[in-house]
């Protein structure tokens, strides 16, 4: 019987919708601001073979590692002799199995129909604290995995729809915020149960065989669409290199990207060895970063599923920072190294498809971890967030100001929420003036976020791009580097490292200034009207207009009529000449 393609399209979009509904349910029932406000969670549906067939528009580093994590989990359970039964739900956070870091609890539920597994529903959510040596469980001083928190191999969280309280108690007994952890975990479980219900409703309408055929059709269709796009690209190999900051040295990531016309192969040979610091990226993270980078240079309407993922090959030598050996710490590999992998691949692809590649973004999740004992409740608290910055200028458009980029896709934590739940008082939250890299198309501005402690607080910073500025392309200039400062109550200001741990006393102020995006194109080709607008909006400084954009000064200050200005602007935009 020939598959009805209309039915296949309905099923494809239904799977995406169910994944999105999972995410809504998870966020609305979560306890922590990190999930409820920032949406630091991801949901997907995978077929019986562990291939992603539907996903929500969530966190790239989560989504891109889910299929590998599921397959690793199933292999582990099979090796342990664990049978999957209807009503079961599993939990895992071992990064070397699940594919990210310990804070990400992955919850998986097999979906049965007529005693047969037809799919898996799964979600990952970043829990604000999972134990370890510091609040937030992400600490720049960690030298081994055990210091980053409790480690769970794949284990049943629900046994035939009955909650395993012993597993829950082990987890909540190893976190500083047990009530929040339990609330977020229950939200994850509820999201999976909802997805199972929706999936079975769909299957009941079309039958198991048609459902499976539709899934295969979707994967095959996506694969063919992607290969068609690859055929339009140049064939060959291109190399890229970028780095991460660690203490007084730089860690190099090297990649060779090969495009065959049918596949993209990425080889990380020559990348630095793993380190005794939490910057190691497990293979799931590296794979997710590669697939993200390649996907972003393809048409936006191409589906995201394993039909696309299967066209990409990743070679990551064991023992390197992009494929470490256990028990190397990995918390920041998920956060910072993933960002730099994307930048490295972009640098390589800039030689192959320059019209599709932007200058470097701020290139960091600017991770901020805090915790202590709340002076009013007497209870321990923990907080985590990532802070955005500027994206890179691109062909024909400026970078975006104050945005999360690459491997993160979260929101900010509203300052009202932070001040309500935690002992801090905000002084400022604004765009960082003049931080975008100058260019014909300027980089986006970074963010300045300033708050004062109302009691003693432990703070951790895990960030990057404070010494190596976001790079530019086509004659543009790099973005401003990030800065992290403490202004003590006595007025003394201390500069922090991009990876630091400290205590704030009552009255001390933390100042976070994130990097701007790199510029694209020669700054002298930027039209004077845009420079004038930039100055009015504080996207550039007076000093920058006097030096870098000095070609625009006469028009900005002179008596030329609006008609002359518009005419000159149009000519420069059309020809690139003055």
Image: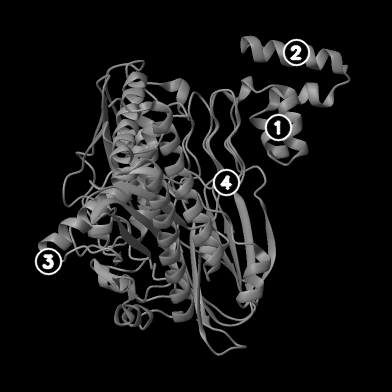
Residue 64, given in percent of the width and then of the height, sits at 35, 46
Disc 1 or 4, which lies upstream in sequence?
4
For mark 1, what is the residue?
Answer: 546
Disc 3 or 2, which lies upstream in sequence?
3
**Front of the two marks 3 and 4:** 3
Residue 90, given in percent of the width and then of the height, sits at 29, 65
**Foreground residue among 444 and 154:** 154
Question: For the residue carrying disc 4, how many other residues have a C-alpha within 10 Å: few (<14), some (14-19), or many (20+)?
Answer: many
Residue in view at x 60 percent, y 47 percent: 402
Disc 4 or 2, which lies upstream in sequence?
4
Q: Secondary structure at mark 1?
A: helix
Label 3 vs label 2: CA separation? Answer: 72 Å
Against 56, is 372 above or below? below
For the C terminus, the quadrant is top right
CB atoms of marks 1 and 4 within 8 Å: no
Against 324, is 524 above or below? above
Label 4 vs label 2: CA separation? Answer: 32 Å
Q: Secondary structure at mark 2?
A: helix
The answer to whether residue 185 is left or right of residue 512 is left
Residue lying furthest bottom in this view? Answer: 378
For mark 3, what is the residue?
Answer: 80
Against 117, is 326 above or below? below
Q: Is residue 408 visible?
A: no
Q: Is residue 511 visible?
A: yes
For mark 2, what is the residue?
Answer: 568
For mark 4, what is the residue?
Answer: 403
Label 2 vs label 1: CA separation? Answer: 20 Å
Place residue 103 in its image quadrant.
bottom left
Q: Secondary structure at mark 4?
A: loop
């Amino acid at each position: 019987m020939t598959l009805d393609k209309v039915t296949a399209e309905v099923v494809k979009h239904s799977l995406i919708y169910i994944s999105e509904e999972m995410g809504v349910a998870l966020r609305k029932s979560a306890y922590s601001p990190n999930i409820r406000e920032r949406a630091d969670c991801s949901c997907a549906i995978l077929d019986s073979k562990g291939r992603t067939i539907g996903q929500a528009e969530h966190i790239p580093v989560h989504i891109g590692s889910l299929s590998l994590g599921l397959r690793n989990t199933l292999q582990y359970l099979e090796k342990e002799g664990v049978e999957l039964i209807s009503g079961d739900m599993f939990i895992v956070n071992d990064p070397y199995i699940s594919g990210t870091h310990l804070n990400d609890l992955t919850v998986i539920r097999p979906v049965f129909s007529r005693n047969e597994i037809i799919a898996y529903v799964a979600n990952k959510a970043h829990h604000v604290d999972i134990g370890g040596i510091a609040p937030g469980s992400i600490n720049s001083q960690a030298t081994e995995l055990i210091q980053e928190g409790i480690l769970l191999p794949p284990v049943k969280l629900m046994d035939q729809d009955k909650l395993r309280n012993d597993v829950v108690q082990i987890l909540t007994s190893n976190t500083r915020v047990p009530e929040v952890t339990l609330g977020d975990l229950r939200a994850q479980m509820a999201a999976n149960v909802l997805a199972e219900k929706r999936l079975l409703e769909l299957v009941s309408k079309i039958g198991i065989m048609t459902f499976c055929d539709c899934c295969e059709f979707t994967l095959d269709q996506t694969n063919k669409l992607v290969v068609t796009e690859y055929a339009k690209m140049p064939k060959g190999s291109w190399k890229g290199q970028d780095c991460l900051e660690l203490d007084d040295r730089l860690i190099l990531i090297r990649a060779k990207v090969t495009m065959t016309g049918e596949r993209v192969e990425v080889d990380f040979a020559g990348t630095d060895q793993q380190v005794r610091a939490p910057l190691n990226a497990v293979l799931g993270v590296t794979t997710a970063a590669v697939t993200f980078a390649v996907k972003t240079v393809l048409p936006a309407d191409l589906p995201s599923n394993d039909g696309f993922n299967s066209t990409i090959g990743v070679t990551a030598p064991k023992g390197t920072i992009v494929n470490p050996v256990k028990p190397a710490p990995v918390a920041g590999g998920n956060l910072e190294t993933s960002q730099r992998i994307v930048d490295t691949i972009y640098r390589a692809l800039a030689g192959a498809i320059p019209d599709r590649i932007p200058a470097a973004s701020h290139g960091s999740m600017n991770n901020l971890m805090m915790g202590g004992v709340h002076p009013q409740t007497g209870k321990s608290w923990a907080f985590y967030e990532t802070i955005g910055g500027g994206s890179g200028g691109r062909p024909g458009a400026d970078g975006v100001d104050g945005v999360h980029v690459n491997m993160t896709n979260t929101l900010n934590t509203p300052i009202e929420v932070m001040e309500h739940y935690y002992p801090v008082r905000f002084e400022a939250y604004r765009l960082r003036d003049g931080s975008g890299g100058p260019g014909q198309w300027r980089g986006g501005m970074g963010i300045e976020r300033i708050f004062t402690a109302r009691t003693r607080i432990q703070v951790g910073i895990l960030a990057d791009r404070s010494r190596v500025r976001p790079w530019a392309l086509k004659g543009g200039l790099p973005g401003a580097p990030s800065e992290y400062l403490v202004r003590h109550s006595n007025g003394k200001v201390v500069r922090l490292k991009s990876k630091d741990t400290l205590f704030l006393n009552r009255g001390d102020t933390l100042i976070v200034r994130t990097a701007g995006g790199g510029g694209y194109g020669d700054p002298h080709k930027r039209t004077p009207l845009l420079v004038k607008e930039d100055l009015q909006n504080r996207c550039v400084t007076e000093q920058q207009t006097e030096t870098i954009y000095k070609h625009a000064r006469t028009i900005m200050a002179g008596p030329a009529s609006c008609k002359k200005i518009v005419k000159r602007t149009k000519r420069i935009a059309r020809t690139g000449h003055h």
